[in-house]
Amino acid sequence: MTKSTEFKMKRRSFLAGSAAMIGAPAFAQTYNSEETTEIERDVTETVRRNISSFRRLDWRPYFSNLKGGAILVDIDSRALHYWADGEETYRLYPSSVPLTEDLTRRGRTQVIRKVEGPSWRPTPSMLERNPDWPEYIGPGPDNPLGTHALYLGWTYYRIHGTHDTRKIGRRSSNGCIGLFNQHISELFGMAKVGTQVLLI
C-alpha cells in the first residue's frame, strides 16, 4: 500500500467517524403503520461508544401486550425502544447507560411520574462518594436530568434528558437512562403514567 493510498484511507475513516458523531441526534427512528436521582459521571473519563447493535426490535419477545405502551431499554446496545399502545408508533433512541454492572438495574417496572423541568438531588451514596457535589440543583441548563424525566417504580431510577450530549451512546451514568433532550421530550409526550418498562 502506498503512502498516498494509506493517507486517503485514514482520511476517509476520519470523515466517516466525524459524520457519525455529528449525526448522533438523528438516530431516533420512527415507524408508523396505519426529585432524587442519579448524576452522570464526568465524561472526560475513558468510556467506549457502542452503536454496533443499535437496531430495530419487535416487542413480542419482551411484552405480552402493549396496553399503555411499552419501553424497552437494551443496556448492551445502549438503545431505548418505545412502542405505543396499538402498535401504531415505534421509536428507537440512542441512550446513555450505567457506567458499571453494579450500578445497573435490570427487570420490569413502570413509569410512575412524569416531570417537565425536573429538579435533582444526589442520593445519599452519591454524596458519600462525592461530598463536594451540591445537595440540590433546580431546573435549568445545569440540571443533570435535562428538560424532562420519567420517574420509574424503582427508587432513584429515571429515564431523563441531558444537556451534555457527549454522554449519549456511552456508559456514563450512575444508574439512570439518559436521552438527548429532544428525544426525552418526544418520549415524554407519548409515554404515560403506567407505561410498562423493561431493562435488559
Image (cartoon, rainbow, N blue to C red):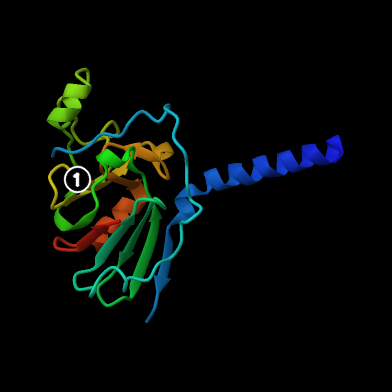
Whether residue 136 can be seen here: no
**Horizontal and vertical percent for residue 74?**
35, 55
- Rendered residue at 22%/60% (across/down): 197
- Rendered residue at 28%/70% (across/down): 84
For residue 147, what is the image quadrant? top left
Quadrant, the C terminus: bottom left
Above-or-below relation of 27 to 50: below
In the picture provided, is 113 more to the left or to the right than 107?
A: left
For residue 41, what is the image quadrant? top left
Q: Residue furthest bottom?
A: 34
* Label 1 environment density (alpha carbons within 10 Å; few <14, some 14–19, many ≥20): some
Above-or-below relation of 83 to 33: above
**Horizontal and vertical percent for residue 114?**
16, 52
Question: Which one is nearer the viewer's eye here, 13 or 147?
Answer: 13
In the picture provided, is 191 more to the left or to the right than 22?
A: left
Q: Which residue is mark 1?
A: 157
How many callouts does the rendering have? 1
Whether residue 42 can be seen here: yes
Quadrant, the N terminus: top right
Amino acid of disc 1: Tyr
